[in-house]
Image (tube, rainbow, N blue to C red):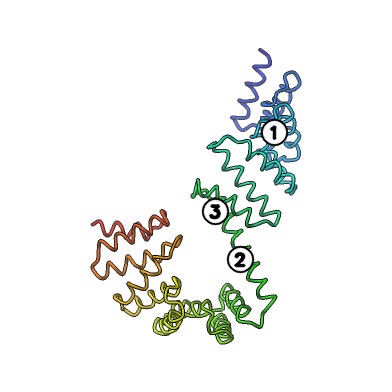
Amino acid sequence: MANGQTLSSARQAELAGDFPAAEKAYEEELKSRPSADTWQRLGLIRHLQSRFSAAIPAFREALRLNPSLWTSRLFLGMCLYRLNNFQEARLELERAGREVPSGDPGRDEIDYWLGATLIALKQPLAGLASVERVLARRNSRLDALELAVKAYADLGSNLWNGVAERSFESAAGYEVHGHALEAEGNVEGALEAYRHSKALDPRRTGPGIAIGRLLLSQGKPAEARAVLDSERQRAPSDPMACYYAGLAAIQLGEMVEAAPLLETADRWAKHDPEPAIALAQVYLALGKRDEAAAAARRAQSLAPESSAARDLLQLLQR
């Protein structure tokens, strides 16, 4: 009865958020009745207080008593990650991933922390694959989205920087330099770099599309359209060239010409809702309400939280 009362007191303290009292109660319980579950509860209490070094022995003891307790293995991996012991964290998290029951919600936590660990181990592609498994199941999970965005940004920057360092005096090098200048807000410098890249390799489409995009942002749709049309002669179905050429046509009031351009861009857009949104607006301007609604629905399927797609659908339902 005393043990039951001690355990009850520990749980009450834990649920009340009094973690020091809960920790003390669990420690007392373990002196007289050690169990894997109580060791795990003690580890969790220490983990919640960010005392990761102290939590690790508790989770290890829980696993010694019950090696199949995958939840302790998950939290052990998380604590090891917090202490920058990434290699050992990876081993524990991978084993937890093999032991977690299929369909258990805990798989999300395992994949997230395994992804973070692999990224920390300089294996970004493997890490992103793990994080994307989380997003495939729960696409609104904010921490997974933030981790994926940062990893992709870091990976992209490293790739761009590698190209620039190896071959700056080249078309690729100047294109990278243009992206860097653009990120710094130096639009004129970026335009000059993109133009230099294009002069070195006229067949390269990336700089031309970037030039058109920046001219469009400067309110120069006619100049942008001329550059983008030139790019489309080399790559008629390039979705980005078609998208920005379509936007330029809209700014020039050429809705009929904009429609096929945006249709091509929308056809190839697998994740970006913007081409479908722009196409819906063009269809609406041309009086094609059914086509506009279909395009807006496609945009919403790609980005359920898009306010632009939602507003278009509401407008079309009136």
Residue density around tag 2, few if under 14, some if 14–19, many if 20 or more, within 10 Å:
few
At mark 2, the secondary structure is helix
26 displayed left or right of 178: right
Q: Earlier in the sequence, mark 1 or mark 2?
A: 1
> Could you say where residue 277 lies in the image, as x and y percent from the top left?
37, 64
| Foreground of the two, 234 or 151 | 234
| Residue occupying the point 69% across, 42% down | 77
Amino acid type, residue under disc 2 in the picture:
Gly
Identity, as a three-letter code, of the amino acid under mark 3: Leu
Q: Which residue is mark 3?
A: 145
- Spatial separation of the CA atoms under disc 1 and disc 3: 28 Å
The residue that mark 2 highlights is: 156
In-front residue for pair 216/98? 98
Picture quadrant of residue 105:
top right
Where 6 falls versus 306 (above or below)?
above
Q: Amino acid at mark 1?
A: Gly
